[in-house]
Each structure stands twice: as structure tokens, then as C-alpha cells.
Image: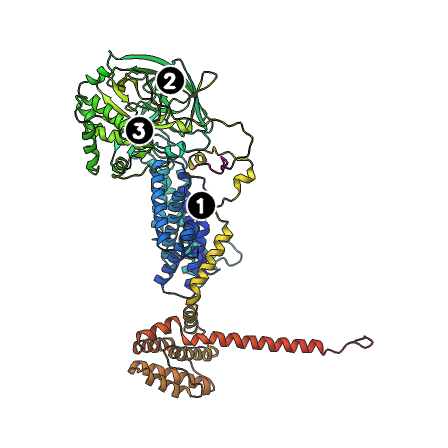
Amino acid sequence: MSGRARLAVCATAATVMASCALLPLVDPATWLFQAAFLLAVQSGVGALTRRVPLARPLTVAAQALVTLMMLTLVFARQQAVALIVPGPEAFQHLGTLLQAGTDDVGRYSIPAPLSDGIRLMLVGGVLVIGLAVDALAVTYRSAAPAGLPLLALYSVAAGLAGGGAAWLWFLLAAAGYLMLLLAEGRDRLSQWGRVFGGAPRVPGPDLATGAVAPVRTGRRIGAVALGIALVVPLALPSLDGGLLDGTGRGVGNGPGGGGTISAVNPLVSLRDSLNVDEDRTVMTYRTNTNETQDLYLRIVSLDDFDGTAWKPAQRHIQEVPKTFPAPIGLGGDVRRSAIQTRISAAEWYGQDWLPMPYPASKVDISGSWRYEPVGRTLVGDHGQNTRGVQYQVTSLMVQPTAQQLADAPPPPASLKREFTKVPESLPAVVANTARKVTRGSANQYEQAVKLQDYFAVSGNFRYDTQVQAGSGSAAIARFLKDKEGFCVHFSFAMAAMARTLGIPARVAVGFTPGTPQADGSMSVGLRDAHAWPELYFEGVGWTRFEPTPSRGTVPAYTQSDTPGNDLPVVPRPSDSASAAPSTAPSASESCSTQLRKLQACPSESSAAAVGPSDGDWPWFKILGLTLAGLLVLGLPLLPMIWRMRVRAVRLGGHGRTEADVPAYTLAAWLEVTDTAWDHGIAPEESQTPRKAAERIARLGEFGPEASASVYRLAAAVEQVLYAPRPRPVTGLAEDARRIEGALRASASRPARLRALLAPRSAVRVAWSTAAAWTTFRTRLSARLDTVLRRPRPSGQNP
């Protein structure tokens, strides 16, 4: 393997090793194998174009073009021309996938499911980084700057994932970069021949051959640098930790011990949960109250609204207290009752936030959990989650009256300032609609009830889980116009409109009370996932409202008629006992990305689980179509590539002995005559080199320098043909290139374009092929004649 080929392999390996830092972000990790395969193809294209050779920018452009074609084949083949050539529809589809991937990144917690959008972001990002590394390290022969894109890849992945295994990804990325540096150093040293490392320390064979000493020194330097990078941060008291220290303090997979909550959006695909074909049980619980219609299991509150999305604010967390403080704003004259609820989470359900009735006052649970006092939530630490946990919650059933809410005094200034923030990018139609709907209200309570009734009853809104959640400042305005969506749309819109009216508001995420079971327990499924607004009233505290039509229950304190009347509950599909075959897709076939993320997809057999789906092509089909596309696109360029390759061989390096002079001189002269032929000056085999040079200079309208070059080259050819011992002549390659430049300068633009793309001298390929075929047939015929005419041994019958 040549030095440059070895360097290309190391560049690809370094990119793959750095990409491993992305593995904790997505589950499953099969995307890495696809990215590695496409990286290998990209690197192979670079190796082929460098052998032509093409100019460096053209090499990078060829790799970028093939990369785009491969991404089109994998992600947009149905919208492409011939499955591989991207057109407007393919680019539009790729853009849609990227937007969907961006939305998925904001919706899912880590590890996110491998949706098509996220897969495109991962594979495309790795290919872009790989192209940059290959261009810097191999094409431009500068491996040191290639560490910058590798560092960017690792830094983004480590910043998002964190976790205790961050040191492993750092070691992999660092090892790949060091391997790349060593390969480049070895390649550079090999161009200088033998490297002397000094006399051997012990008797034995000469160990100074090759680049042994410098490579050994490079290994030592790399090991020392890596050790310093790992150890020094641990030794500095001013830092929170080193590379071996996880993600610092906070929740999630880090070491915890205080700190803050990471602003990770806990809306784990509510839409996918609501649309599952099989309503998997998330948890079951038993409680000592019969009023379960208001027992929403709250996970977390989203109180930071930036115009693009609602998300949890970054807040400090602490040890879980034995008894929680009294809920903020709850006065002593509001009716309440303490209830006990024992909850058991399913073994497959892994959630960092603990579902609890609100407001909880005490939680008995084992494991590593932290308490966030503002939202009154529990968050898993050290990788703790809800998978299979059992716990008991003591909470309050707060039952305010409508009069108490109507008489609520203004909230504290600090609380109002924080929870009534709306971004400047919020469309004016949101505030205008809020004022129009609540016109004539006597207080903020009446405003809140009118907002709830507008969405749930009078506004003609339609509940539809198939509507995309959307993002951006215009998402709420679009929802108010289209009037269709699901709980995310309704809760987000009501909370934003309440804030424009000066009412403190936030969004809660969790589950509706679930379904009663025959044994007295309650069962909560994926379809019970829900989001609802919470509005603050001084003297009562954070109060639940229900603007989503046909979901959950409308609180009694917001109803104008008899307390306790509920809006119709969403009808649940009944289990069919029929044994007749169904034409609907099976659960495994229609399993959503949310169920796949939670590893809850049922399957009939392991073979069906691992079999390829209709949307995923086997790698050999992708490889075959990639090669076919390259052939279709590259076929018209073959004459140009062949001429560039032949020119590089003819004018490239050669031996310096007298025996090498004839071949090199005649090759340079043949290159000149072929170049003239490409530009319209056909060769005449009957002319002497001097006459041919005169003709080329005259028809090509050469200047003094080019004329001198062609005559000098013709003289060298005559010396080779007629001198008994031809002497080497320097500068023949420079003369040939100077003649080529003169021919290009005197030709018209169409002639130059034809000489580049369709060179006339390329017919030599056909001549060579025909001559080779003739030679082969002659030899084959002679061989057959010899076999057929071979005399037989005496006594053998014919």
C-alpha cells in the first residue's frame, strides 16, 4: 500500500473513531455502519481522482458530488432521477428530512430514536466531516489542521451526551488523530529514503531501516500529550472536573451531587405516543381516593417560552427532602385533602422525570433521585430512571372554588415577571386573539375560563393527533388559524395567550388519570400521554386547566353548571375477540419510533425483527446503484480522464540513466503531437520531427518561446532516433507544457472545450484495443493450429 493510500485509510478510520462519540445520542447505533460504508466510498473516490491526477479542488469537488449522490440514493431515491441524481424534488425532500430531524432533536430526550431525519443529520454530518478530514490530510497533505473538524465532531457529541463514558470517546477520537499524524509523518519521511536513527544499542541486525526512530518518537509524544490532557484537568483545583469526570453536576447520567437541571425538553414524542396502535401500559397505580378524574400524573412543567418551544428552565436541584415544603401560593382557606398513591412503572418505560400527582408533599422511593423545588419534580441522577420502579406518593387534592379563584389578589411581582414573559417574535395575532376572546372579563379567572372554553367548546377547534406539532414563532399563529391539533397545540397556545394577558402560566407534561381496572387499580398507557396548561392564582397556587377537547376532564372550578360534569372522555378501542384475520398492519409493522425507542415493539420471531424492511435497502444494492450512477455520470468524462492520466504518465517522473532517455523523450514528443491533434492539428506520420515541429509552430501560431520549445523537443527526438548514444536533455516536460499552453491560447473557446472533453487523440484507445485484439486472435489461432497439427504417437488411431 502506498503512503497516500495508507494516509487515506487512516483519515477514514479517524473520522469513524471520532464519530463514535455520537453513539450515546441515538438508539440504535446502526447508523454508524452505514456512515462508515459511505465514508469508505467517499475515500475511494478521492483515491481514484488523485491517481488521475485531478487538480486538488477538482478532487474535493468530485468527492462532494459523489457524497451528495450517495445521500440522495439512501434518503431520497424515490424523488431523484435514476435513483441517484438529485433534482429539485430530491433537494426538497432532503430539506424536509433535515427539518424533521431538527424537530426530533428538540422533541426527544437522549438517547433519541433513529428517525429518518436524525439519521440524515448524523450520516450527512459524518460525511461532511470525513470530506474535510480527507481533503486536509490526504489531498492537501496537511494532517495537523484535520484535527479541527475531528475536534468539532467530538465536542458537539460530548457536549450533548455527557455521561461517565465521555473519556472513552475522547480516547477513541484522540487515538484516531494520533494515528493520522503518524501516518502522515511516516509518508513524508519515506519520501526522503532511509532514516538513520543512530547506532543500535545492542548487537544485532540493523534496525535503522525505514522510519522507525521518528515513528517511535511520535508515539512517545502522542502518549505524553494524551496523558497530560487527561491528568492535568483532574489536578487543577479551579476546575469542576477532568475528562474522566463525566458531565459535571446535574441530572441525567452525570455524577450529580447538586447543580442544575439540564434544559432537556421532556416532550418525548407525545404525538407518537398518542398514535400507537398498541396502547402499551406505562404504569399502574392504586390510590385511596375515589375522585381519580382529577388525578393527573405530572412529570414536569415547561416554564421557559422562547418563541420557538416551551421547555424546562435551568434550575437548581437538591437532595429529596423527607417532606416537601408547602406549595407556593396555596392559602389556608382552600379546601384540600391528603391522598396516598402507590405507583408501579413498567419494566420497559424509562423516563428521567418521575410521574406524580400534583402537588406532591412526600415521596418514598429508592434509587438516586434529585428534587427541583420550583416545579416540585423529582429527576433521576447517575443514570437513574423510572424503569420498573415502585414508589409511594403523598399528595394534596386541592379543590378551590370559582369564587376563591375570582377573588385572587395579584401574584408576587417576581413570579409574575418570570412567568408572563413572551418573546418579541410572538405574532401579534396571539395577543389580539386573547384580548378578543376574553373581552368583558371582570378578572383574570374569568379570562382563564374563557380561554379554556374557546379552545374546548366555542372556538370550533378539532382534536387531531396527526397534525405536526411544528416549531417557530409562527406555530401558535398557524394553529389559531387552522384550528386543529392535539394537546401540545392547545396547552401551548392557551399558556402563551394567558401570558399576554398578564396571567402567570406554564405547561405541564404527564399523563391523564388512566383507565380503572377490575381489581381496583388504575392503568396508564401511552395514549394517556398529555400536556395541559397551569395558571397561577395567588391563594390557590398553580392551577390546572383543560383546553384540549375530548381529552381528560374539565376541572369543576371552571364549569358554569353543576360541579363534577365532565367533557366526554376519548373513546378507547375495545379488544376484539374475533379470530378472523385482519387486513390491518401488525403491531410490529406499525410500531412507532417512540415504541422502538422504548424497546417495546412486539415481534412474532427474532427473524422477523432483524429482517430488512421495505424502506431499507441492503448494502449491496446501495453499492451497486452507487457504482451504476458513477458509471453513468463518468462515462462521458472517460476521454478527458484518460488524456489527463496519459499526460501525467508521459510527463511524470522517469529514470535518469542513459537507457531511460529514449523512452522519456519519445513519450514527451508523442504528448506534444497528441495535444496538437486535440486542438485540430492532425499528425502526419511521413514528416520528420523537424518538419512536424515547423508545421505545429506555424498552424498553432506560436510565439518565440513556444517555437523554441517545439524545435528543442524535435531536436531531442532526432538525437534519440539517429545518435548512437543519445544524451539526456533537461526540461522536456516543461517544453511540452509550454507548447500545450500556446495551443490553448491560439484556439477558440469551442476548440478548447472539445480538446478537454472530447480529445481526438483518445482514438488511440480504440487503436490499442483493436491491435491487442488482433494480436490475441493471431496468437490464439497459432496455438490452435499447433495443437491440431501435433503428430500423434505411433499406433494411436485417428
Q: Does the image show residue 198?
A: no
Judged from the image, the secondary structure of the residue bearing numbered disc 3 is: loop
Residue nearest the viewer, comparing 98 with 792:
98
What is the crowding at mark 3: few (fewer than 14 residues within 10 Å), some, or many (at least 20)?
A: some
Judged from the image, the secondary structure of the residue bearing numbered disc 1 is: helix
Q: Viewer-nearest of labels 1 and 2?
A: 2
For label 3, the residue is 259
For label 1, the residue is 32
The three-letter code of the residue at mark 2 reads Thr
- The answer to whether 694 is drawn above or below residue 58 in the figure is below
In whole angstroms, how far apart are the C-alphas of marks 1 and 3? 33 Å
Q: Does the image show residue 765?
A: yes
For label 2, the residue is 292
246 to the left or right of 576: left
Residue extent of the magenta highlight: 583-592
Query: Is residue 722 found inside the magenta-colored segment of the image?
Result: no
> For the point 31% across and 34% down, which residue is it?
484
